[in-house]
Amino acid sequence: MSAVVETTPKALKPPVDPASLTHQQLLEGDFWRRIPAYRDVDEATFLDHHWQAKNTITRVDKLLAAIQGLVPQSFIDDAASGFDTAPMAVRVSPYLLSLIDWNDPYADPLRIQFIPMRSRMLPDHPKVGFDSLAEQADAPVPGLTHRYRDKALFLAIDTCPVYCRFCTRSYAVGPDTFVEKVNLKPKKDRWEQIFAYIASRPELEDIVVSGGDSYQLRAEWIREIGDRLLNLPNIRRIRFASKGLAVMPQKVLTDDDWFRAVVDTAALGRRLHKQVAFHTHFNHPNEISSITQRALNRLFEEGVVVRNQAVLLRDVNDREETMALLVKRLGHVNVQPYYVYVHDLVKGVEDLRTTVQRALDIEKYVRGSTAGFNTPTFVVDAPGGGGKRNAHSFEHYDRKTGISVYTAPSVKPGRFFCYFDPIDQLPPEGQARWADPAEHEKMLAEAVTAAGG
């Protein structure tokens, strides 16, 4: 008697309910009409990049007027006071404003990133300073940071489609606030110095074009930078860095000249067997809407590679489930999660920083939730110019004082670089030591010695 062969595969795991796949559920419809100022705006107008740019709010009084009636006067007063002490100027697009949940603005993760509230501000860490990453110290010519042997950062422009509170380059980006900014305007003579330097360094193969934001570069500037760099024999890779897709995807949909310049530059790279990619910056899954997907689909259809670099932000994406949803949603819209930065030491935004330990816990949770190539690396950009280090690669980490120590043997050998967790997140013992200025250098010396220095 022959054995019966079972042909039905044995299910090791039951199928999930499709409704549980929340990373696929994107905000749709005319959601912008929830804002009184945009109640009568039709879809064609809202998708017009000219309309978005023209109606982008750059004055505090206009921003607060746009949300009048949505929030109590106490919120208006709190935000106005917050802008008075913020190192970044205000710049908020209608699209971004319409994504914020104005029923609970204090807790909304997008509001937290772009609209400072005086009531939530904390004192800066004693080790915070402008240009904490020492980008200017590694600049052989104005606007070019050459830190890594084969890679350089080309700061082509000093404006962005919106201004993030937590910007690492608040020393240069946007108009002067109470801070007098370094001048990185898009001037051709400054660019010529940069092109000449890059051409003179055969070890340079990889250029990140940023600013500011490459979204703000005119179409002819995109072509000029792309053509000049790709036709240098030493250059193998270009990355255009931008926050734009997260805050104004309409530009990709309706600014055909700019879009074609990006696409043609990527195509030129392929013909020359060189890589051209677009690096963007989503921090929360709520930033990815159906409009975002339409813009990303347009880039995907033209073969433009898009990668994401996020920043770990307190009360924005510092919960395991939130970061996992962001990573999955990015993969769903064909964006490769690349980095998650532990928040840099930036003035005026201590309330947004969290600890290295938080990054370690979240990375452990996220890893295994999706494919490895769609899993970001969590990094600390070492203060003082050590460059990006895997968050878990510290030589020493004291959770009581919040000091983590990194080395960068391929960048600046023989040196130790210290990152500092926010003081209010430390145990009482650590907070007490930071409250005493006489303890600061002692803690630093202890940490470096423990790291082998």
Image: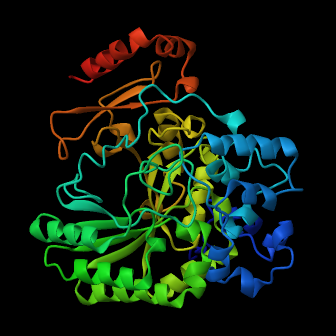
Q: Quadrant of the N terminus?
A: bottom right
Q: Is residue 59 left or right of residue 155?
A: right
- The residue shown at (19%, 83%) is 231
Q: Quadrant of the rendered structure where residue 192 is?
A: bottom left
Q: How is the image coloured?
A: rainbow
Taking 378 as reference, is 141 above or below it? below
Q: Is residue 447 left or right of residue 376?
A: left
Q: Is residue 412 left or right of residue 30?
A: left
Residue 78 in sight here: yes
> Residue 327, how many percent across, how many down?
55, 59
> Residue 232, how many percent across, how many down?
16, 78
Q: Quadrant of the rendered structure where residue 5 is?
A: bottom right
Taking 263 as reference, is 106 above or below it? above
Q: Nearer the viewer, residue 431 or 18?
A: 431
> Residue 33, how many percent across, how many down?
84, 72
Q: Nearer the viewer, residue 341 or 185?
A: 185
Residue 315 in sight here: no
- The residue shown at (37%, 80%) is 221
Taking 354 as reference, is 36 above or below it? below
